[in-house]
Image (cartoon, grey):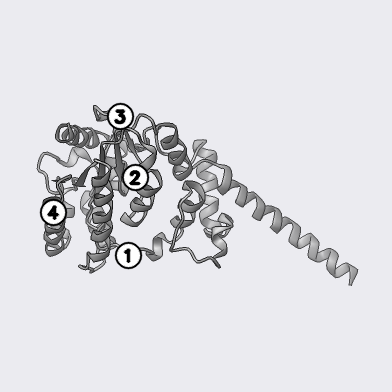
Amino acid sequence: MNSFFKNALLFTIPLLLVFIAIECFYRYVPNNYSYKNKQIQTQYGNIETLVFGDSHAFYGIDPKGFDRSTFNISNVSQSIYFDKLLFEKHVDSFPKLKNIILTVAYTTLSEVDDKLDLKWRKYFYKNHMGLTIPLISKYDLKQHSLALVHKLSKTIKYVRDYFKNGTLVTSDTHGFITTNLVENSTKDLDGFAKRVTINHEDGLLDFTQNTKRIQEIIKQCQSRDINVYLVSLPVNYRYVNLVNSKKVAKIYDTADALALGNSNTTYINLFEDNRFDDSDFFDANHLNVKGAKKCTVILNQIIQ
């Protein structure tokens, strides 16, 4: 029996040590969630414009291009659900906040709260950005242990990326992406457009829940004398040609209605803007650094 327990310990202890190492890696190695959470708090006193949204905003809106002090708190696959939680957590900490930008992408208004391929992100919002996430059950062990969130293969990839690059952070101090270089732009825009539009098409036209969230943000901004800019960022014409035109029209109508119904709200629709060509895109639906600079100039002129 003593031999059995000894062998069991010899087997268990290395696994436990690996588990602890993974937990420490996810807890203490900075990533975009923890880094943006830290940076925004150090800039509370200066920020006048705050940018929310998904990867389109992360790639496409550079705070350094605005006349007013701006911070970009967007992130890859960040939905309106998390935009609203972040807004409510931080809004009263900005003594100078005058404007917020909310990205309205093709997927924004129809996106469900807990998409299968995005389920893991909520644990990082909770642990690294200090959000209370109603989606997380109180019995969910992953909220207490980030080592349980990803498969081992995914964790190994993150560890390799960390040792290769020396960091997991791909954001500058203003929240803009640091790895979106022109020379890394996708070469096969046609192929990428076909793949990404298939992935983005959820077949949903019910915008009720997310429209309500945007309206609630707008209402809270009205009470604080904050302007709201709903922005559909540019995408490549290949992407436009492949998505559901009826859904696109409904997105435009919904955003227009929000702007018309609220005196503090403006809709800026750059989705099909012909000022942007292939040289402005990282891939079929994200701007590169050149395109982001052009887009930011346009937004800054309108906001100013």
**N-terminal label among 2 and 1:** 2
Whole-Å distance between the Cαs marked 4 and 2?
Answer: 25 Å
**What's the distance in space between the residues labelled 2 and 1, CA to CA?**
18 Å
Which residue lies at the image location 27% right of the left edge and 55% below the top edge?
A: 216
Tell me the CA gap for discs 4 and 1.
Answer: 25 Å
**Circle 2 crowding by C-alpha within 10 Å: few under 14, some 14–19, many from 20:** many
Residue identifier under label 4: 261
Tell me the residue that label 3 is attached to.
69
Q: Earlier in the sequence, mark 3 or mark 4?
A: 3
Which amino acid is tagged 3? Ser
Where residue 73 sits: x, y (%)?
36, 42
Q: CA distance from mark 3 to mark 4?
A: 28 Å
Residue that sits furthest to the front in the current view: 223
Residue at 74% x, 61% y is 12
Task: Name the quadrant of the C terminus.
Answer: top left
Residue closest to the eye, 275 or 262:
262
